[in-house]
Amino acid sequence: MREAMRRSIGREQPPPGGLCAGPTCNVVQSAAHARNCVRTGRQNFRHDDVKHAILAAVRQMPGLSAANVAVEDHFPFSAKGEGRLAMDITIAPNTGFIAPKPLKEGGAAAPPIALTAGGLQPGQRGVLLDVCLKDETAQTMRYEASKRSGAAALAGTKERFNTYPGNYCPATYTLFPLVVEHGGRIGPHAYVLLKAFASHEAAKTLVPRGQLLARWRQRFSIALQRTLSRSTMDCMQATRARDGPAAPRPDT
Ligand SMILES: [Zn+2]
């Protein structure tokens, strides 16, 4: 949390004076690099931390549980012969959770799909939740992000849509990429889905929807800040451990 506070006031941990300890990464270590290096395996920890925080919260919603909310599930893809794929979080169809209508990759409403026999109405369909963390300050994103806020979240959403087309049945499941930028901004699909979560809970409890939505945003934010802080500190520590004691830190 101290890391999160530092970033929010524009202060990062000083560079430890060494290279990233990733075996194939020769970049000079810094807080910004430690946060988003993808050569140490920590990108998987960051992703999984956020995934598990969201999974736990989804399973606690009324009517949902471990029985109908799966993690790393191959099932939605196996019908299309793509069992090698797995979805981060899958809400089964017909759980009572009213899934939002499908959106196109940019966030606009998608045209309705022709229902075949046995096809489900949009609200009855299952939901495929693909968690993705995007660093809007990464070298490749800076230009786009400077022109348009949310550009990184949108790029992440498009990547997800390119990964899964035709690999699942859209009459049974709707894909909602849960893309979140390191600064906390979420993509259009994630926002629509969180609103649906809040509506679902509000209908079953006496808590106002706005308050529930704020709680969902908070969950995302806390999971994100916690994992980014951990990633930064672990990665810096790995450099210090390998390259010897760090120079004295001027700010402690
Ligand atoms: Zn690195």
Image (tube, rainbow, N blue to C red):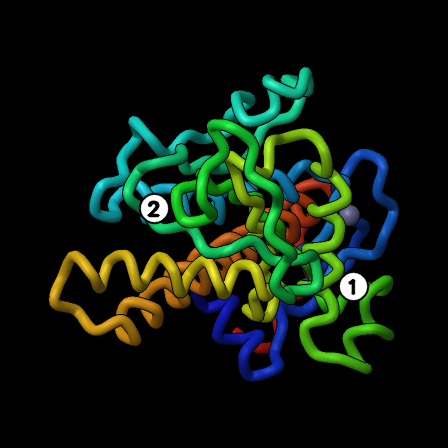
Residue 138 circle label: 1
Relative image position of residue 252 (x, y in whole percent): 52, 73
The residue at which mark 2 appears reads as 58
Q: Amino acid at mark 2?
A: Val
Relative image position of residue 112 (x, y in whole percent): 60, 52
Image point (52%, 59%), residue name:
190
> Quick check: 48 above or below 204?
above
Image point (52%, 44%), residue name:
129
Query: Distance between the Cα atoms at labels 2 and 1?
Result: 30 Å
Q: Nearer the viewer, residue 40 or 109?
A: 109
Q: Is mark 1 within 8 Å of ligand 1?
A: no
Res. 46 visible in picture: no
Image point (52%, 38%), residue name:
173
Relative image position of residue 219 (x, y in whole percent): 38, 60
Q: Quadrant of residue 69?
A: top left
> Quick check: 244 above or below 12?
above
Image point (35%, 57%), residue name:
197
Q: How many marks?
A: 2
Would residue 194 appear left or right of 3 to someone viewing this image? Answer: left
Residue 84 circle label: none
Q: Amino acid at mark 1?
A: Ala
Relative image position of residue 11 (x, y in whole percent): 61, 78
Q: Nearer the viewer, residue 99 or 159?
A: 99
Would residue 208 appear left or right of 20 to someone viewing this image? Answer: left
**SS at mark 1?**
loop
**SS at mark 2?**
helix
Res. 207 visible in picture: yes
Mark 1 is surrounded, within 10 Å at the Cα level, by few (under 14), some (14 to 19) or many (20 or more) other residues, namely some
Dot placed on the residue nearer the N-terminal end, 2 or 1: 2
